[in-house]
Amino acid sequence: MMQKRKRTHKKTSHPLSGFLAGTALGLFAVSALAAGADRVFHPEPPAPSAEPIAAVPAPPVPEPSNPEQPRTTTIAAVGDLVFSRKIADRLPISGWKELFAGAKPLLAGRDIVFGNLETPVSYRGTPYPGKFPDITFRAPPGILLGIREAGFTVLSIANNHISDYGAEALGDTIAALDAAGIARCGAGRDGEDARRPAVLEANGKRFAFLAYVEPMWSAVRADNSPGAAWIDAEEIEADIGRAKGSADFVLLSLHWGEEHAGVPRYADRALARRLVDAGADAIIGHHPHVLQGAEFYRGKPILYSLGNFVFDMRSPKTYETAEATLVFGPEGPREVRFTPARIDAETFGPAAAEGDDARNIGALLASRCAALGSTLEPVDGGTYRLRPPGAYRTPESRNESSSSVYGLGIVPSKP
C-alpha cells in the first residue's frame, strides 16, 4: 500500500502584465520543484488592490453569541476555469484584472475558495495526440496572479484537460501553483502525489480536499509518471479514511457526468452516496458545463455540477452559473448558499447575475434541485439556500419516524 503524505498549505492593467507575471512565476517554479510537500495552508485573503471591492450580499450566517464558541467556516466553490482560446487571445489586450473584476466581489469574505483549473499553465509541452486544437488547452503561468487575486486558495487539477500538453506542461503547472501559494489536489508528479490531499486550516478546523477525474479520453492516469487521480470507488474510500486521520472534514471534487446534461446520471448519484457513507463531508462536481441540482444525503451536501466559471463555449446555457458557499459549523456542514452568476459573453469573466437574469438562473437551479427531491429556498439579497431535509420539518414532525432515503442511506430510484 502506498504511504500517503498530506499536502498542506498556508493561505496567508498593463497589457504586459501577463507576460511579466508568467516570467516571474516561471523562475519561482524552478525552486518550487525542490520544495517539500508537507505544508499546511492557512487561507488568507490576497493583498488588497487599490480599488475598493464591494462583496456580493449573502444571507447572514448566525455566529455564536459566546465569543469562545467556534465560528462557522465558509467555503466558496465554483465551476470550470479555462484560460485558453479566445480568453488567452484577450489577455494581452485587457489584462487579467478585467477577467476577474466580477469574480473578486463574488468570492469576497469566504474563508476558503475552491475551483477546478481545467487548463495547464505552461509555455512548454506537446499537444495530446489526436486531440482537436480547439479543445487542447494551455495558458500562460501569469494567469495564476489573477486567480490568486480573485481569492482562490485551493484548486482541483483532476480533469480531462490538465494533460493536454503532456507531462512537461503538467509538471510546470504543479510547480507554478506551488510557487504561487495555491493549494492543489487531484493531479501530481506520480500517483502518490495525485492522491495526496490538500489540507487547509480555517477557524481552528482542518479541511482536506481530494479530487478525481472519471476515466475518459485524454485524462491521463497518474501512476509512476505525471497525471491525474482517476475515479475508483475503492481507492477514494481508502483516501478518505487516510485523510480523516489528520483532518476534521474531507471534501471531494469529482470530474464526472455528461456534458450539457442538466440532471446527474443515476450511477453518479449512487457513487456520491457510497462516498458519503465512506466518510466524505461534501462532494463538488464538475465537467457537464451546466448547472445541475444539489442535495443533502445524511447531512452532507452533494453538488453534482457547478457548470462553468471562466469559459468561452458556444452554448448560451453554459454562461449561466452560480457560486456555492458551503457553510460548516464545528459539527459539520449546515447549509449551502447559491448566488446566481453569469459569464460575460465578451470578456468571459463571471459576475453576480442581476434582476430577471438572476431570478431565472435561480429558478433553473431550483427546478434541478427539485428533480433530486431537494428544496432550494430564496432568501434576501437574491441568493438561495439549500439545507438538510430535517431543517424544513416542523418540531412535531421531527419527532416522528421517517423512511426518508436521506436518513436510511437508500440509493435513490433512477431520476
Image: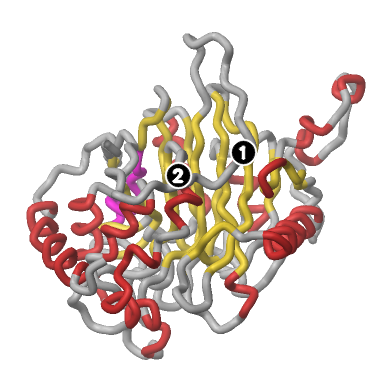
Query: Callout 1: 10 Å neighbours few (<14), some, many (20+)?
Result: some
Instruction: Please indicate whether residue 171 sits to the left or right of residue 379 in the image.
Output: left
* Residue 19 image point, x, y percent: 17, 72
Q: Nearer the viewer, residue 108 or 297?
A: 108
Q: Nearer the viewer, residue 82 or 20?
A: 20
Q: Residue at x 24, y 47 (%)?
A: 181
Q: Quadrant of the C terminus?
A: bottom right
Q: Residue at x 22, y 38 (%)?
A: 38
The amino acid marked with disc number 2 is Ala
Residue under circle 1? 277
Q: Is residue 387 visible to the viewer in this orientation of the structure?
A: yes
Sequence order check: which comes first, mark 1 or mark 2? Answer: 2
Q: Distance from label 1 to label 2 (Cα)?
A: 32 Å
Q: Is 385 in the magenta?
A: no
Q: Is residue 168 visible to the viewer in this orientation of the structure?
A: no
Q: Quadrant of the N terminus?
A: top left
Q: Which mark is residue 108?
A: 2
* Helix, strand or loop under label 2: loop
